[in-house]
Image: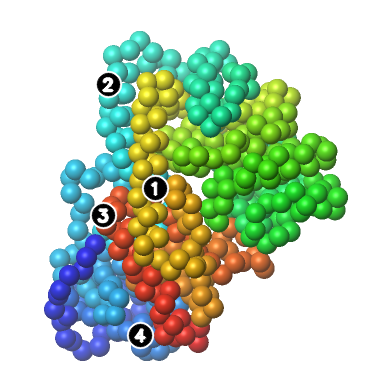
C-alpha cells in the first residue's frame, strides 16, 4: 500500500502510561497506543516517538518497542514509512473492497506478509462455488456426511493416481492413502514406520513442523552433515554408518527453505544408499507441481522403500485439506491405520471436491495459474533484490535471502517488521539450533496483490543495504 503524502501532526512527545496493565510489555505498549488513538490523545497523523527514544523513556529494550510498534501496525492503529517513522493512520484501518473479501482472507492493508508459504489467491473460490452448486443437485450429499468405507475411497485413490501422473509417478489405487493435508500425511507416515526412540535423518535445514512432530512421537531427529547444502549420498552413508537410522525425511524438489532441487543423478545415488542400508524414505513433494520441468520424484528411483507425500494445499488452495501418500504395499496398511487413528478419515466433502477438480480439469487450470503467478513474482524479486544474496527457483513460491555481514537474521526480521514487512528467519528451519544460518526465507505468494509484493521487496532491498540501521540494532 502506498502511504502517499500526508501531514505529520506536531505534538508534545507522547509516552504511554503502563500503570496497572498486565501481560507482555510489548502488548501493553501496543494496547496503550490503540487506546490513545481511540481517545484522541494521539490524533490522526501524529508521529510516534522514535523507538530508541521511547525504549529509553520507558526503561525497556529496543526489541520490546519494535515488537509493540509492529503489533500496533498489524492491528491497524499506526503505519510506518521508511525514513519517516511511525505515525497514527489518518483514516484508520482500511477494510478490503467487498469483491476482495473472499480472497482467501488475505488483508489488503497492514503488514506485508512474506512469512506464510501459501498459494496465490486466484479463481479457486469461483470454482468452489460452481462445484458446490453441482453437488447440491446430486444424490451423494448424504454419503458425504457419513463415515467412509474403504470401498468408498476407491474413486478418490484413482483421482490421486491420475494427479501423480502429472509428475511422472505411476501408481496403483491400492498404493494410495488419503490424508488431511501433507502435514497430516507426514505424521501418519512417521506413526506407521517408527517407534519412540528411533533415529530419523533429515537435511540440516528442513520443513519446520517436522521437528515438533518428531518430538511428540519420541523420535530423535538427526541432521545430515553438510550444513545447508544439498542432501548428498556421502553424508547419508556416513550418518547411516554412525546411527541406527530408520528413515530419511527429505524435500528433493523446491526444498524449503533453500529453494534447491536435487538433480536426477543425486536422486539415484540417494536411492542406492537407502536400498543398501535398508532405509525408508519419506519424500515431501508438496511443491513438486510448481516447476515446469523437474526430475522424476525420488519415489521413481526407489519405489519399494519410498513413501511419497504431496497435497493440494500449495498447487490449488490451502483450505482444500487433502493429502496423498503413495507407498509400497508393506506400508500402505499401516498408513491407513495411522490416518484412522489420528483423524479417522479426511473430510469426505473435501476429498470429493478434489477428485472432481482433478477429473474435470479444474485442478490443472488452478495449478497453471499458480505457476504463472510464481514466475511473475519471482521475476519482480530478481529485479529488486541484490542478486548475489538471493537463491531462488523461477517457478517457486519462496526465495532464500542470505544477509550481509552487518545484519543478524533476528535483528533483520524485527527491523523489517517495524517497517511493515514480515519474514521468517533461517533458524526456524534448522534442526540443530546452533547451526542457524544468517538468512531469511521470503514467500512471495501469500499476498493477494502483486503491488504489495513489490512494495515489500523494495522495503527489504533498502533494508539489506541500510548499514546504519543494522549497526543501531546490533548495539
Q: Nearer the viewer, mark 4 or mark 3?
A: 3
Q: At numbered mark 3, what does the secondary structure look like: helix, strand or loop?
A: loop
* Label 4–label 1 contact, CB within 8 A: no
Q: Where is residue 45 in the image (x, y as percent from the top left)?
A: 17, 76
- N-terminal label among 3 and 2: 3
Q: At numbered mark 2, what does the secondary structure look like: helix, strand or loop?
A: helix
Label ID, residue 54: 4
Q: Position of residue 289 (x, y in %)?
A: 48, 37
* Label 4–label 3 contact, CB within 8 A: no
* Label 2–label 4 contact, CB within 8 A: no
Q: Name the residue under label 1.
A: 374
Q: Which of marks 4 and 1 is in front?
A: 1
Rounded to the nearest angstrom, the CA distance separating label 4 from label 1 is: 41 Å
Rounded to the nearest angstrom, the CA distance separating label 1 from label 2 is: 30 Å
Q: In the image, 271: left or right of 308? A: right
The answer to whether residue 217 is seen in the rendering is no
- Between 146 and 429, the residue placed more toward the observer is 429
- Between 449 and 135, the residue placed more toward the observer is 449
Q: Mark 2 points at which residue?
A: 133
Q: Which of marks 2 and 4 is in front?
A: 2
Q: Mark 3 points at which residue?
A: 108
The N terminus appears in which quarter of the rendering?
bottom left
How packed mark 3 is, by other alpha carbons closer than 10 Å (few <14, some 14-19, many 20 or more), is some
Q: In this view, does 434 lie above or below 279?
A: below
- N-terminal label among 1 and 2: 2
Query: Residue at point 54% right, 40% down?
Result: 294
Query: Residue at point 67% right, 48% down?
Result: 214
Amino acid at each position: 500500500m502506498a502511504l502517499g503524502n500526508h501531514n505529520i501532526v506536531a505534538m508534545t512527545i507522547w509516552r504511554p502510561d503502563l500503570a496497572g496493565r498486565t501481560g507482555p510489555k510489548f502488548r501493553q505498549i501496543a494496547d496503550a497506543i490503540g487506546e490513545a488513538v481511540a481517545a484522541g490523545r494521539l490524533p490522526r497523523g501524529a508521529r510516534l516517538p522514535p523507538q530508541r527514544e521511547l525504549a529509553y523513556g520507558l526503561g525497556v529494550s529496543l526489541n520490546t518497542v519494535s515488537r509493540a510498534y509492529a503489533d500496533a501496525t498489524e492491528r491497524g492503529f499506526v503505519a510506518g514509512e521508511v525514513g519517516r517513522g511511525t505515525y497514527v493512520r489518518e483514516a484508520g484501518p482500511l477494510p478490503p473492497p467487498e469483491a476482495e473479501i473472499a480472497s482467501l482472507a488475505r488483508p489488503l492493508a497492514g503488514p506485508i506478509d512474506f512469512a506464510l508459504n501459501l498459494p496465490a489467491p486466484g479463481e479457486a473460490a469461483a470454482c468452489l462455488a460452481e462445484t458446490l452448486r453441482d453437488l447440491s443437485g446430486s444424490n451423494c450429499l448424504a454419503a458425504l456426511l457419513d463415515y467412509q468405507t474403504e470401498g468408498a475411497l476407491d474413486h478418490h485413490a484413482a483421482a490421486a493416481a491420475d494427479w501423480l501422473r502429472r509428475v511422472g509417478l505411476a501408481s496403483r489405487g491400492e498404493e494410495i492413502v488419503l490424508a488431511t493435508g501433507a502435514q497430516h500425511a507426514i505424521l501418519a507416515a512417521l506413526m506407521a514406520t517408527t517407534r519412540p526412540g528411533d533415529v530419523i535423518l533429515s537435511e540440516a535445514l528442513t520443513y519446520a513442523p517436522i521437528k515438533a512432530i518428531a518430538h511428540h512421537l519420541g523420535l530423535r531427529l538427526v541432521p545430515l552433515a553438510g550444513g545447508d547444502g544439498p542432501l548428498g549420498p556421502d553424508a547419508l552413508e556416513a550418518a547411516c554408518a554412525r546411527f541406527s537410522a530408520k528413515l530419511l525425511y527429505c524435500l528433493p524438489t523446491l526444498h524449503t527453505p533453500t529453494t534447491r532441487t536435487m538433480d536426477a543423478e543425486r536422486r539415484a545415488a540417494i536411492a542406492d544408499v537407502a536400498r543398501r542400508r535398508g532405509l525408508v524414505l519419506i519424500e515431501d513433494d508438496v511443491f513438486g507441481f510448481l516447476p515446469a520441468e523437474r526430475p522424476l520424484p525420488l519415489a521413481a528411483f526407489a519405489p519399494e522403500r519410498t513413501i511419497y507425500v504431496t497435497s493440494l494445499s500449495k498447487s490449488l488452495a490451502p483450505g482444500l485439506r487433502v493429502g496423498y501418500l503413495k507407498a509400497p504395499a508393506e506400508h500402505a496398511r499401516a498408513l491407513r491405520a495411522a490416518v484412522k487413528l489420528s483423524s479417522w478419515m479426511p473430510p469426505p466433502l473435501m476429498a470429493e471436491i478434489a477428485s472432481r477438480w482433478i477429473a474435470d480439469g479444474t485442478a490443472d487450470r488452478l495449478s497453471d495459474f499458480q505457476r504463472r503467478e510464481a514466475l511473475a513474482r519471482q521475476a519482480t524479486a530478481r529485479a529488486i533484490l541484490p542478486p548475489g544474496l538471493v537463491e531462488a527457483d523461477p517457478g517457486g513460491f519462496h526465495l532464500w535471502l542470505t544477509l550481509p555481514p552487518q545484519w543478524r537474521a533476528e535483528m533483520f526480521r524485527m527491523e523489517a517488521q517495524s517497517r511493515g514487512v514480515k519474514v521468517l528467519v533461517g533458524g526456524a528451519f534448522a534442526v540443530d539450533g546452533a547451526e542457524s544460518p544468517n538468512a531469511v526465507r521470503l514467500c512471495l505468494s501469500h499476498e493477494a496483490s502483486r503491488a504489495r509484493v513489490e512494495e515489500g521487496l523494495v522495503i527489504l532491498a533498502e533494508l539489506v543495504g541500510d548499514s546504519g540501521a543494522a549497526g543501531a540494532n546490533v548495539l
